[in-house]
Image (cartoon, grey):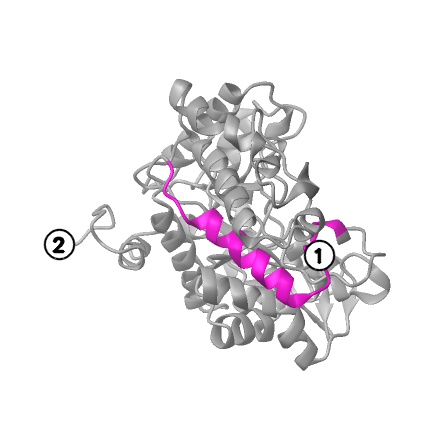
């Protein structure tokens, strides 16, 4: 009899087998995220309570508060252990971290911003940078890397203008596809990281350059310019992660738009990976875009649209949403579709066999390499970096 524990089976088959065994509580846990930091990153009792059925994702952004690389790795191992022990099927969490300019981790390498690296016009170098970021984060147990930024930026009033590679869709496509390839290229400590490209789509075409407001972008401009870098990363580099933007595009909140996240992204563009929310975006669907009578109604719309995980904490994918599934008000297939994609991603990453950060010399050998910090200046054809 086949089992999801059989690592010789494919990720999709293992995910399907596991899904059949899971309770509703376990399924809901897989579409949620925990932000385990307040005044004390070591409040493991709180983490225990918030992950009582397991967890889909864990934020690591506040690892920067920690003092050493060894402390970072020990924290990841402890939190992952809690998550897996709470899960009836010992399902590991995905740990995520920013990756635009490197990791917010002690002894990791920092790189120029997206707009600076775009000025190199060097996709080969960009791929090398991504390989370094991927190796350093994966060694620490982090397998969702929140990069590259594939926004085409044409309005410098937008406060996040510097995250983009620039204003030309072809340049952003070439650099972004290279970065995605670098992130997903290698196996590190028997794990594979996956790139989460952002912010889908037309985020930087917002009115007045205002963050997260309305974006009036005609269909042709949307698909041929603003979606082009995402299509390149999907087609050329098999991109496996997408983070939708905060904006509404042509009157539809992207995070709750079936047209955007399913019809355009999955059916037309061919994306087959995991869609995770920008921080607070599911809650914003209700509180900012005024969608749904309640947070759970907005959450139901986001989930049906194709948003697989709410981050960084539970607002719309809440207990009342769970009741909507248990009562039959919502079709359980909507939830199962999202959970299946989350589980498949975890199997692809190798987390069931290798869920923990490395330790000691092995950890330091992968994270702290002298060549990482000399890479940009080590290319004489790119003296700008020096």
Query: Which tag, 1 or 2, sits closer to the chain's start?
Result: 2
Task: Report whether 314 appears left or right of 137.
Answer: right
Q: Residue at x 38, y 52 (%)?
A: 343
Q: Quadrant of residue 77?
A: top left
The image quadrant where one finds the N terminus is: bottom left
Question: Which residue in the protein does label 1 denote?
Answer: 284
Is the C-beta separation of discs 1 and 2 under 8 Å?
Answer: no
Q: Residue at x 31, y 59 (%)?
A: 12
Q: Which residues are magenta?
A: 162-188
Residue 70 or residue 111, whichever sits in front: 111
Task: Report whether 303 appears left or right of 346.
Answer: right
Tell me if residue 299 is in the magenta stretch.
Answer: no
Residue 140 or residue 325, whichever sits in front: 140
- Residue 253 drawn at (x, y percent): 69, 67
Dot 2: within a 10 Å radius of its alpha carbon, few (fewer than 14), some, or many (20 or more) residues? few
Question: Which residue in the protein does label 2 denote?
Answer: 1
Give SS at disc 1.
helix
Q: Residue at x 20, y 50 (%)?
A: 8
- Residue 348 drawn at (x, y percent): 35, 51
């Amino acid at each position: 009899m086949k089992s999801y524990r059989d690592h010789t089976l494919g990720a999709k088959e293992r995910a399907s087998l596991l899904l059949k065994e899971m309770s509703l509580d376990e399924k809901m846990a897989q579409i949620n995220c925990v932000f385990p930091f307040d005044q004390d990153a070591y409040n493991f009792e709180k983490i225990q309570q918030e992950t009582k059925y397991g967890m889909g994702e864990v934020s690591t952004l506040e690892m920067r508060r920690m003092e050493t690389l060894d402390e970072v790795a020990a924290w990841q191992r402890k939190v992952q252990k809690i998550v897996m022990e709470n899960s009836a099927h010992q399902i590991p969490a995905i740990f995520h971290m920013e990756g635009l300019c490197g990791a917010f981790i002690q002894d990791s390498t920092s790189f120029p911003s997206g707009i600076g690296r775009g000025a190199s016009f060097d996709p080969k170098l960009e791929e090398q940078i991504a390989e370094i970021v991927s190796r350093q984060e994966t060694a620490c147990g982090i397998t969702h890397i929140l990069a590259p930024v594939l926004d085409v930026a044409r309005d410098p009033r937008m406060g996040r203008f510097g995250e983009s590679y620039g204003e030309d869709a072809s340049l952003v496509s070439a650099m972004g596809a290279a970065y995605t390839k670098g992130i997903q290229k290698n196996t590190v400590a028997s794990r594979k990281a996956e790139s989460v490209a952002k912010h889908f789509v037309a985020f930087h075409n917002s009115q007045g350059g205002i963050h997260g407001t309305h974006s009036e972008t005609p269909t042709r401009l949307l698909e041929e310019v603003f979606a082009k870098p995402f299509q390149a990363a999907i087609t050329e580099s098999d991109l496996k992660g997408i983070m939708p933007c905060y904006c509404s595009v042509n009157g539809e909140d992207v995070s709750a738009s079936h047209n955007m996240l399913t019809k355009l992204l999955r059916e037309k563009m061919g994306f087959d990976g995991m869609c995770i929310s920008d921080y607070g975006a599911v809650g914003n669907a209700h509180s900012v875009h005024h969608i749904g009578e309640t947070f759970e109604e907005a959450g139901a719309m986001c989930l049906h649209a194709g948003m697989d995980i709410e981050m960084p904490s539970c607002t719309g994918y809440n207990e009342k949403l769970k009741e909507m599934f248990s009562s039959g008000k919502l079709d359980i297939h909507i939830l199962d579709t999202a959970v299946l994609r989350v589980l498949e991603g975890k199997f692809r990453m190798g987390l069931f066999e290798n869920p923990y950060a490395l330790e000691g010399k092995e950890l330091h050998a992968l994270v702290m390499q002298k060549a990482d910090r000399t890479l940009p200046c080590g290319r004489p054809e790119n003296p700008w970096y020096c």
